[in-house]
Image: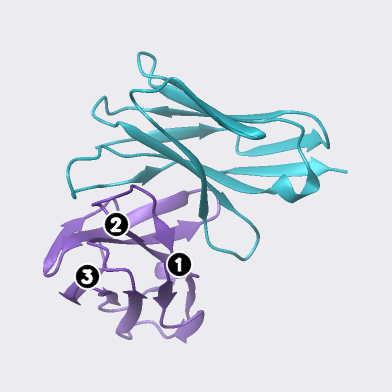
Chain colours: A purple, B cyan
Amino acid sequence: DVKVTQSSRYLVKRTGEKVFLECVQDMDHENMFWYRQDPGLGLRLIYFSYDVKMKEKGDIPEGYSVSREKKERFSLILESASTNQTSMYLCASIDARSTDTQYFGPGTRLTVL
Amino acid sequence: GENVEQHPSTLSVQEGDSAVIKCTYSDSASNYFPWYKQELGKRPQLIIDIRSNVGEKKDQRIAVTLNKTAKHFSLHITETQPEDSAVYFCAASPFSGGYQKVTFGTGTKLQVIP
């Protein structure tokens, strides 16, 4: 059973703080993704990675960066959090060798005050 | 890049009736079209998917149709039940080896009224 975990379910930060969101998958998946989910806007892709140290911008990368030093771990970084980054953040992974199914983590509800 | 539009944004049906959700996509290179269901407070989970070489796929009460020429695909749920109430997302992806970018629609909130 594929397991995708995220470091926090709920997080409250202040404007200007540096924020790290971590995602870990235990199934040796190559592709990993970070989305943010907002009401009425669906899931919007922030960044994705198809290999260690490889990253590609998604549709809304501004204000975010990512790190993938190990295959199982994909981190989303908010260099200087702003109130408009208050959102639900979802991580996902795909085993590109055998399936196209995305497996999602439980999500992190981030509030920036 | 790919753009996926999804309609309607909300849908209310009586239990036992059918529900249809429609999506259109813009990138002709897209060849994989999954549908995800997200129950309140839970993570999205895949319920059905279809590839571009297939026009229709069915799994019990759920079916998906794809029209590549028109660039649209639809989710059909028959004999709806209260547990079908959730937000449904369509998506499109141009699978290319291990390099995938999945683009989601904006979601449809389905309410099944008992």
Q: CA distance from mark 1 to mark 2?
A: 13 Å
Q: Is residue B105 above or below residue A92?
A: above
- Image location (x, y in percent) of residue A88: 48, 67
SS for tag 3?
A: strand
- Image location (x, y in percent) of residue A71: 20, 72
Q: Which quadrant of the rendered structure holds the C terminus of chain B?
A: top right
SS for tag 2?
A: loop
Residue where numbered disc 1 is placed:
A1
Tag nearer the camera, 1 or 3: 1
Same chain, marks 2 and 3? yes
Circle 3 crowding by C-alpha within 10 Å: few under 14, some 14–19, many from 20 = some
Q: Which quadrant of the rendered structure holds the N terminus of chain B?
A: top left
Q: Is residue B43 above or below residue A26?
A: above
Closer to us: B29 or B61 = B61
- Furthest residue toward right: B114
Ranked by sequence position, the earlier of labels 2 and 3 is 3
- Quarter-wise, where is residue B41 in the image? bottom right
Q: Residue visible at 24% across and 40% down? A: B95
Residue where numbered disc 2 is placed:
A95
Residue where numbered disc 3 is placed:
A65
Please state which amino acid type lies under the numbered disc 2. Answer: Asp
Q: Are marks 1 and 2 in contact (CB under 8 Å)?
A: no
Closer to us: A8 or B62 = B62
Q: Is residue A31 left or right of residue A2?
A: left
Q: Chain of mark 2?
A: A
Q: Chain of mark 1?
A: A
Q: Is residue B40 above or below residue A4?
A: above
SS for tag 1?
A: loop
Q: CA distance from mark 2 to mark 3?
A: 23 Å
